[in-house]
Amino acid sequence: MFEDLSFWSLFRMSLRYLELLSAIIGTLMFYKYKHTFLKYFLILLWYTALNEFLGKYIIDYQLENNLTGNNRIIYNIYNTINFVVLLLIYKHYIQSKTFKKWIVGFIATYLISLIISGFYENYLVVGQSTSYIVGASFLIISIAYYFIEILNSDKVLNIQKSLLFWISVGLLLFHIGSIPFAVVSNYYASIPDLKYMFYVRFVLIAILYSLYIIGFIWSEKEE
C-alpha cells in the first residue's frame, strides 16, 4: 500500500478539498460561534484552503513554463500567521492571567526565532523548520494547559459539545506528529526510507480537518 505512489498523490490532492470542505462547513455553522473569538478561526480556515490552492497553482505554473523555484515562501508566511492566530485564540480562552502572559511571551519568542532562522534558512527556498518547531511546541503547551483548565472545571461534563475541544484535539495530534517531519523535511526528504514520514503527515492532515468538521457539526451554539 505504501509503495503505491499514485494512491498517495491522489490522497494528497484530496486533502486540499478536505480543507476547503471544512471551511465551507465552518461557514454554514457560523451561527454557532459568530459571537465568540472563534470567528477568527474561520478566517484562518479559509486562508488555509486558499493558500493550498495557490501553492498548487504556483507549482503547476512553474512546471508548465520550465521555471525553477518553489512555493515555500507562501507556506512560510502561512505558518507565521497560523501560529500567531492560534496562540491568540488560546490566550483568549485560557482563564489564567499568568499563562496569558506566558502566551504573549510564546508569540514574541516565536517571532524572534523566525527572524533568527532567516539568517541560515532562506525563506524563499526552504521551509522554516526551526521556527516551526518552536511555534508547534508553544502551541502544544498552550493546548495542554487549556485541557488542564477544562479538566478542573465544570465544563468537562459537556466538553464534547465544545467546538474548541475538537479543534484542540486535532491541533494537538497534528503538531505532535508534525514536529519530527519539520526536523527532516528540508534536509533528509530525499532519503527513500523517510518517505513514510510524508505519508504519516498526510494522514495527520486528514485527521485534523476531519476533527474540525466533526466539531463544527457536533458542537452546540456558543454565546
Image (tube, grey):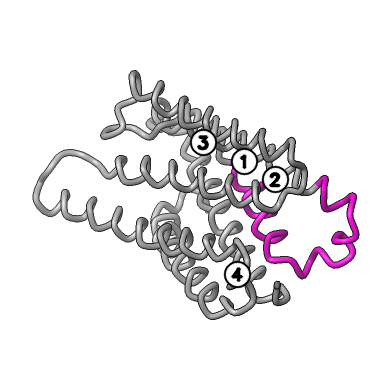
Three-letter amino acid code at disc 3? Phe
Along the polypeptide, which appears first: circle 3 or circle 2?
2
Along the polypeptide, which appears first: circle 1 or circle 3?
1
Residue on which disc 4 sits: 213
The residue mark sitting in front, 1 or 3, is 1
Along the polypeptide, which appears first: circle 2 or circle 4?
2
Q: Position of residue 107 (x, y in %)?
A: 54, 35
Q: Position of residue 67 (x, y in %)?
A: 12, 43
Q: CA distance from mark 3 to mark 2?
A: 20 Å
* Residue 151 falls within the magenta-colored stretch: yes
**Closer to the camera in the image, 4 or 143:** 143
Residue on which disc 1 sits: 139
Q: Position of residue 113 (x, y in %)?
A: 47, 25
* Residue 109 falls within the magenta-colored stretch: no
Residue on which disc 3 sits: 181
Magenta-tinted stretch? 148-177
Three-letter amino acid code at disc 1? Leu
- For residue 143, the mark is 2
Check whether the beta carbons of the residues at disc 1 and disc 2 lie within 8 A of each other.
Answer: yes
Image quadrant for the C terminus?
bottom right
Q: CA distance from mark 2 to mark 4?
A: 19 Å
Residue 144 position by quadrant: top right
